[in-house]
Image: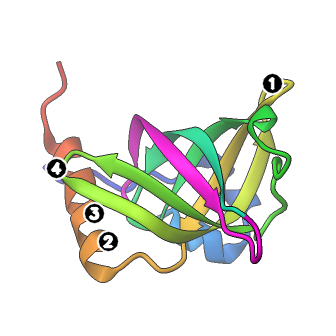
Amino acid sequence: MARAARVSPSSKDLPSETSSARREERLDIALPVRLISSRAKAVDETIPGILLDLSASGFQILTDRRFSLLLPPTRNTRLEIEFFLDELEIRQVPIQVVRVKQLKPYQLMLGCKFLDLPTAARLALRAEVLKRHSKPRR
């Protein structure tokens, strides 16, 4: 049986372009992730985090502001992301921060959207999310 897309209750507070992105089926997950800040004439900075939920259009990450002087990012900050979901490898894909939420004194939750996820990766990600939702829960 197909499941209806889950829309975050807080999506009403988001701009319309991000609200439409949240119509994708989302998967609650906990995966390690790396955010990469590429700067001209400087060494790339890698920021670790935990992927909290994922869809073919975006995701939420938990990170700690003590990992980088670049945290917290401003809205619309562009970074790159890397993570692995079984056989699917997402490497150096451009993203944009659409929401930053302070959780605890140092913890941040970043709501982000993919900017240029290759079509094959987007389709594979969408299929993986749907596959995991269709598995019976124990």
* Amino acid carrying mark 4 in the image: Lys
Residue at the disc numbered 1? 104
Helix, strand or loop at label 1? It is loop
Decide which of 18, 63 is in the foreground and name it: 63
* Marks 3 and 1 in Cβ contact (< 8 Å): no
- 23 on left or right of 79: left
Q: Nearer the viewer, mark 1 or mark 4?
A: 1
Residue at the disc numbered 3? 126
Residue 122, label in figure: 2
* Amino acid carrying mark 3 in the image: Arg
The residue range painted magenta reads 24-42
How packed mark 3 is, by other alpha carbons closer than 10 Å (few <14, some 14-19, many 20 or more), is: some
| Magenta-span inclusion, residue 35 | yes
Q: Earlier in the sequence, mark 2 or mark 4?
A: 2
Name the residue: 80% across, 33% down: 66
Q: CA distance from mark 1 to mark 4?
A: 33 Å
Q: CA distance from mark 1 to mark 2?
A: 32 Å
Name the residue: 58% across, 39% down: 49
